[in-house]
Amino acid sequence: MTTQPLLFADALQRIGCELTPEALDTRRAMLETLFAQAEERQDLENGLRYRFAGDDATLDALFGMIAAERTCCSSLRLTLQAEPQSGPLWLEIIGPAEAVTALQQVFNAGHN
């Protein structure tokens, strides 16, 4: 059975996003740019895990994304792990069970 993709705004609503319609396009562009840089994506039972390069610019971008997402999508658990010696950065995004498909769609930029 194939699941139809949700509209971006509908997917955001399912993960509890509180962005205004005016802010949706800006946030979507930010997420697409950031997640296109991910070196690996792992689907989890309740969310996603991404591996990013361990450079300072990527770390700053991930901090900015986490700060932005926790103000609008308060149902998400965002965990950032930095490996030793400037190794890769791992970002885990976990959401409520009923929102996993939407979560995977919203944070899927550049990965299929």
Image (cartoon, rainbow, N blue to C red):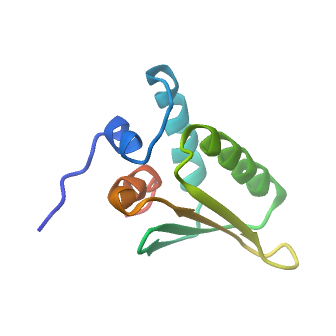
**Quarter of the picture holding the C terminus:** bottom left
Residue nearest the observer in this picture, 50 or 19: 19
Count of residue discs = 0
Q: Which residue is pictured at 77% across the width and 67% down the height?
A: 54
The picture places residue 64, in percent across and down from the top left corner, at 72, 44
Q: Residue 51, can we see it?
A: yes
- In this view, 107 is above or below 43: above
Quadrant where the N terminus is found in the figure? bottom left
Q: Could you tell whether 22 is left or right of 86 in the image?
A: left
Task: Report the side of 14 relative to 3 (left or right).
Answer: right
Relative depth, front residue between 41 and 14: 14
Q: Residue at x 48, y 24 (%)?
A: 20
The residue located at (43%, 62%) in the rendering is 111
Q: Where is residue 41 in the image (x, y as percent from the top left)?
A: 50, 70
Asked if residue 37 shows in the view, the reply is: no
Residue 83 drawn above or below residue 103: below
Q: Which residue lies furthest to the top in this view?
A: 22
